[in-house]
Amino acid sequence: MRGPLVKPKLGRDDWAQRSFMLVIGLYLIVALALPLYVMLSKAFTIYHFDLRQYEVQVSDESGNFGETLTLSSHNMRPSPSVVEDLSTNTNGRLGIAQFFPDFSFRSPVNYRFRGVTPSAVYLIGSERNSGPDWVELDSNTFRRVVLRPVSERGLTNFKTYFSTPALFQSVQNSLLIAVIVTVITVSLAFWFAYALARSKMHLKGVFRMVAMMPILVPSLLPGIALLYLFSPRQGMLKALMFGHDINGPIGIVIGSVFFTFPHAMIIISTALSISDARLFEASESLKASRWRTFWTVTIPGARYGLFSAAFVVFNLVITDFGLPKVIGGNFNMLAVDIYKQVIGQQNFEMGAVVSIVLLVPALLAFGIDRRMQKKQVALLTSRSVVFEPKPNKPMDWFFFGYASFVAIFIVGIIAVCQFAALIKQWPYNLSLSLKNYDFSRMDGGGWGSYTNSLLLAILTAIIGTVVVFLGAYMVEKTKGFEKGRAIFQGLAMLPMAIPGMVLGIAYIFYFNNPSNPLNFIYGTMIILVVSTVTHFYTVSHLTAVTALKQMDTEFESVSQSLKQPFYKLFWRVTVPVSLPAILNISIYLFVNAMTTVSAVVFLYSTDTALASVAVLNMNDAGDIAPAAAMGMMIFYTNAGARILHALLSKGILARSNAWRKSG
Amino acid sequence: MLDSAPSIYLRIENLWKNFGDFTALRGISLDVIEGEFLCFLGPSGCGKTTLLRAIAGLDLQTSGKVEQAGVDVSNFPPAERNFGIVFQSYALFPNLTIEKNIAYGLENAKRPKSEVKARVAELLELVGLPEQGKKYPAQLSGGQQQRIALARAIATKPGLLLLDEPLSALDAKVRIFLRHEIKDLQRKLGITTVMVTHDQEEALSMADRIVVMNHGTIEQVGTPLEIYRNPASLFVADFIGAMNQLPAEAHGNSVKIGSVKLECDNNELSGKIIVTIRPEDVLPVETEGANTVKANIKSMEFLGSFFRAELANTELGDVAFSADFSINAVRRLGLEEGTSLFVQLPSERLKTFPEAG
């Protein structure tokens, strides 16, 4: 016979840990789940003017009122209807004088007006009115009456979207560009990574460093460089375009290859570096040709890495906003559509609809990528032997040439920006000057936007690292509360699938609502930090979890048996041992906070203008050279941060050398 | 060895543990005597580690009671219990020196630093590594690290020491050396100790008593000699040491194996049974006598101090069984593969069990 179930008695640690997890879980709910929910519901909200809800009596000139009619019947009377389409958006207003063909604001005719139900809202001038009490108005006042829309749930927004060719075309455009870029980038990155892993070419360290450079600049920077090189009017190399316009798909593709290259390269490099050298020896001993070995050993070994890289690139391109904004011309892409709908047309509902349309491929690519990553891990066994390439002169020189070509492309783009930033006035005055760095003379926030960005990056790095690492620690190293931990883990994975533009618009909906108690952070630095930490949460979380997983699972048990509180172990062991990972997380957050445009473009205010957004705005205003200069400021800062990070990491590794060497 | 009226330090009553649909412990009840060295022994998945973790409070049992030193600690978190623990992985904190690892549980506001230092020095002396305090764990060998883990576990003088496969990660020689070290230390300190192991040699050589477990239940509790000599079940007989199993039919004190009838002193069963005998109890004899059978040596394996021979005898039915022959006997009788000989199965060494299943 079994006794009663044992209910654990919670110790002090358990309570402390649970409250920590609750706080960080709450953070993810407020900063991610709720805004997304509000955005989803926005997409399904439709607004229209309900004319049946309003009634009017019109008097004759001597003041005798006639029959009561709804506005709806007034609308029908002069056939065809005055207003055919009554759908609108949140901000819709509809004047009612137009329903009365004989209306004149000078006439002595009076009007009585009311809403049939309390929900029938209308404005007289700017004064809000509602409800079934009759209001008597003279003609002059009557012309200032406007109706407010009512909302309901429905799919109309989606129907509108898919039946508007101008909008729907973007889906095709985005998919097409994403696929083209994916093919080009993955091919280029594969051979680059292959050269690094499997050849004895010279300058590998330099090539590896150059390949990572695009990560340090905003995705829109290559757009600016391409404008300088190929712009139809003043491009340095415009002849190479043979009459094609760089503004449009060509520019987007070239720029996208530039900024997605390092992401693909890292993933494929990892996949190639974990292939087992013994397979190559086996293949060689069976007298297989190099070509056959390549197709039967190299490619299958790296295939998950290739797939994974493809989906990551696809996702980056389809969700990117900065580049197509700068160099897209009239070629519409989904992410830019969101911006146009929200900022240009103030049509928030349609912005939400485009967001959901964009979310579908992004979620799909993310889901498939996660599966690939899991399989990749399974290929790695602890017995694998690291492959050591043998020298092969012609091959090594061939790869050297290839890597140089890619490196020149990357360095070239950045060099053009640097050049543009230093030239007085292209193409008339080529003398060097620093006047383009005098941002105070331009729109976009001046040097203030740079210091704001720096502040944002530092705050994001510090706060983000603390939140992410604590969250990962709670998920990975605490016991009990399984359901809570599973939900938390799910929430932590979500941001990677959410495009920045979607997060940004979700934040507008959620935080700009005056009835939200957190409304006060709207327009401040806080919301920028929160959105950036959330946007880049997943990769940081995975880095932290990986580091924590490598730690002995019994540390916690030992510490508990010695009756020590969990925070002592956390401070004295967990944090010091994870320090390299912690530094990696903070540099990742810093660099991304400096370069990101997508979420923050919706959320910055005049006081919190950012450098990356300033690049966009100056470019929009035609100040391309200062835009390039600001882009380069971001580059210098990130490069400096990377160097600092490298020095710090090296110092830490040297100091902990005694205990880090495996025993 | 133990007091005439042993006091019970740890009492486990009707412990059950479920992981989803899987039942890892099925109603375990057990008393651990103060000061004894107890081993949980069993194949992997038998529930021995689960039981240890329940005692520690690291993974609470689903139901049942754990009483330590008279206090019901069934639902206590580990920090509120009183034990030290050593894991197979040592779990030494890599970034802290040996001294700091040992001092980890000693440091608190009430205890003066000098006292901590003295205790650490004492412990280092106790585990025989007095010079190593300033080093980091990665700079020590596996065996040394395990001794440090032991020192850390006993630093706070806990009432109970738990060892979770402490020697499994070490190579054979170090393992045997550490067996003695740990056993000596345990005796010196008189600390009640529970060790989990899957290595029967380790259990036999170290434990005062062994708890043999299988499928989440206790098969037998007893001293190493009891367990070896008088296994309570076919599982124990088979798991500890080598054991021949011969299907037979029982009639009172005689059993019929194949067409051979043998005397069997201790049989209380009837019908279809299994007769067991350890290989070292099978004696080579020169002439036919009581309880002897003729056998043919199919193969011989030299195992250092003796030979293990695979024997076949058609009269016993179609079963092979093995016997250990001393080097002397092999030389004296000129035994080699293909030789036929008489072997005696002494009636007091034959044990009978009901047929499995």
Image: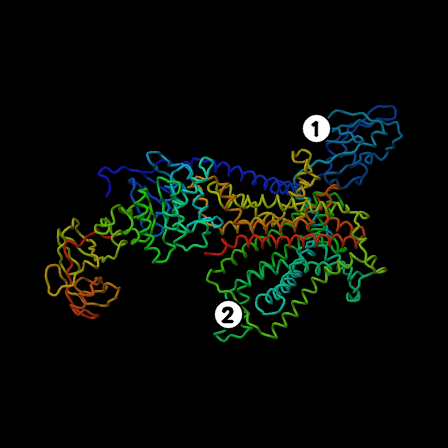
Query: SS at mark 2?
Result: helix
Position in image of residue A296 (x %, y %): 52, 69
Chain identity of mark 1: A
Q: Quadrant of the C terminus of chain A?
A: bottom left
Frontmost residue, A175 versus A64: A175
Position in image of residue A322 (x %, y %): 71, 52
- Residue farthest toward the right in the current orientation of the protein: A106
The reply, left or right, for residue A475 in relation to residue A636 is left
Q: Residues within 10 Å of mark 1 (few under 14, many from 20)?
A: few
Q: How is the image coloured?
A: rainbow
The reply, left or right, for residue A423 in relation to residue B100 is right
Instruction: Determine which quarter of the picture holds residue A534.
Output: top right
* Residue type, label 2: Phe
Instruction: Determine which quarter of the picture holds residue A239.
Output: bottom right
Residue at the spot of label 2: A280
Frontmost residue, A571 versus A548: A571
Chain identity of mark 2: A
Instruction: Determine which quarter of the picture holds residue A422.
Output: bottom right
The disc at residue A118 is 1
> What's the distance in space between the residues labelled 1 and 2, CA to CA?
79 Å
* Residue type, label 1: Pro
The disc at residue A422 is none
Position in image of residue A55 (x %, y %): 76, 29
